[in-house]
Image: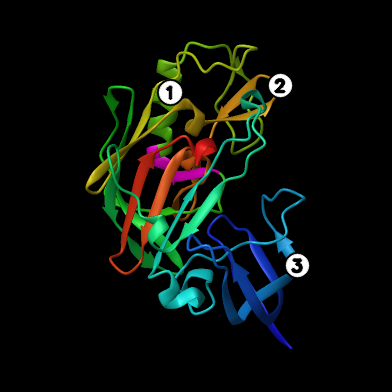
């Protein structure tokens, strides 16, 4: 019996055993696609920020055991996902969608494409800086991992400190006590859940800008208290999945390009 051990950028990990089976997926052609001898893991020692109902994690990297790699020519190195918000004010019970192959292409008005890098089992893009509203913060020249598994967005401490100061200048809501050592910048939002007076945060990637709405940047902690979902990181910068809500995010790992398109993911 083979065993596996996987560590993720946000300090999550999973340990377990490996097996194989036939995997059958729905297809846009109308006929299911079956992949024989598909390798999968069964974790018995896991740590991370997961829902209790979570039954596993799909590996989307380019290693030999990843979901995408094992699907091979069937998908041509393309996949996309569109993550919805589960904020209680939005009252949606729909699920986020993921597509593989030609159906995963991201294009059209509003879409931007950025060069993608793969390093130490993670996808990275170049990050040049941030803006809060019309205020552009100090320039930066580094890389940030695009992570569909990590919830929060982790920034280098200097960049985070600049962002925190700019946010506090822009937002006039009543401040709330920090929730923990990560969720430090918190406010009491209106009881109707409307995010008024929250500036747009723009990420200046190498080659394109991505504008984040308040839905992407403030996480509900409890009751009507919301906290900034950007936190200081010790090691690597991470663009987490909360900041990717309501974006159609497409990967082409043959061309090494990632694309973002603002989308109402509940309608996908």
Q: Earlier in the sequence, mark 3 or mark 2?
A: 3
Look at the image and give the residue range highlighted in magenta: 152-159
Q: CA distance from mark 3 to mark 1?
A: 38 Å
Residues at marks 3 and 1 touching, judged by CB atoms closer than 8 Å:
no
- Tag shown at residue 223: 2
Q: Earlier in the sequence, mark 3 or mark 1?
A: 3
Q: Is residue 146 magenta?
A: no
Outermost residue, front side? 30
Marker count (numbered): 3
Q: CA distance from mark 2 to mark 1?
A: 21 Å
Relative placement, left or right, of 55 versus 232 is right
Q: Residue at image x 48%, y 11%?
A: 172
Figure quadrant of residue 266: top right
Whether residue 23 is visible, yes or no, is yes
Q: CA distance from mark 3 to mark 2?
A: 32 Å
Q: Residue at image x 39%, y 53%?
A: 250
């Amino acid at each position: 019996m083979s065993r596996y051990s996987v560590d993720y950028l946000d300090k999550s990990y999973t340990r377990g055993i490996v097996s194989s089976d036939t995997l059958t997926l729905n297809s846009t052609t109308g006929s299911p696609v079956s992949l024989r001898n598909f390798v999968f893991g069964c974790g018995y020692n896991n740590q991370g920020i997961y829902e209790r109902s979570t039954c596993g994690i799909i590996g989307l990297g380019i290693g030999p055991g990843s979901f995408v790699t094992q699907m091979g020519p069937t998908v041509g190195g393309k996949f996309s996902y569109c993550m919805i918000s589960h904020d209680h004010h939005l009252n949606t019970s729909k699920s986020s969608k993921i597509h593989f192959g030609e159906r995963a292409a991201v294009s059209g008005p509003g879409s931007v494409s950025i060069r993608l890098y793969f390093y130490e089992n993670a996808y990275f893009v170049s990050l040049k800086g941030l803006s809060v509203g019309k205020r552009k913060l100090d320039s930066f020249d580094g890389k940030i991992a695009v992570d569909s598994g990590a919830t929060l967005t982790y920034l280098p401490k200097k960049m985070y400190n600049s962002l925190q100061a700019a946010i506090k200048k822009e937002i006039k809501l009543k401040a709330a006590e920090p929730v923990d050592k990560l969720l430090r910048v918190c406010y009491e939002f209106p009881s109707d859940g409307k995010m008024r007076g929250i500036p747009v945060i723009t990420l200046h990637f190498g080659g394109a800008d991505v504008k984040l709405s308040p839905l992407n940047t403030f996480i509900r902690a409890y009751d009507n208290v919301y906290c900034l979902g950007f936190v200081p990181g010790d090691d690597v910068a991470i663009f987490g999945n909360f900041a990717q809500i309501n974006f159609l995010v497409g990967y082409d790992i043959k061309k090494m390009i990632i694309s973002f398109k603002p989308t109402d993911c509940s309608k996908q």
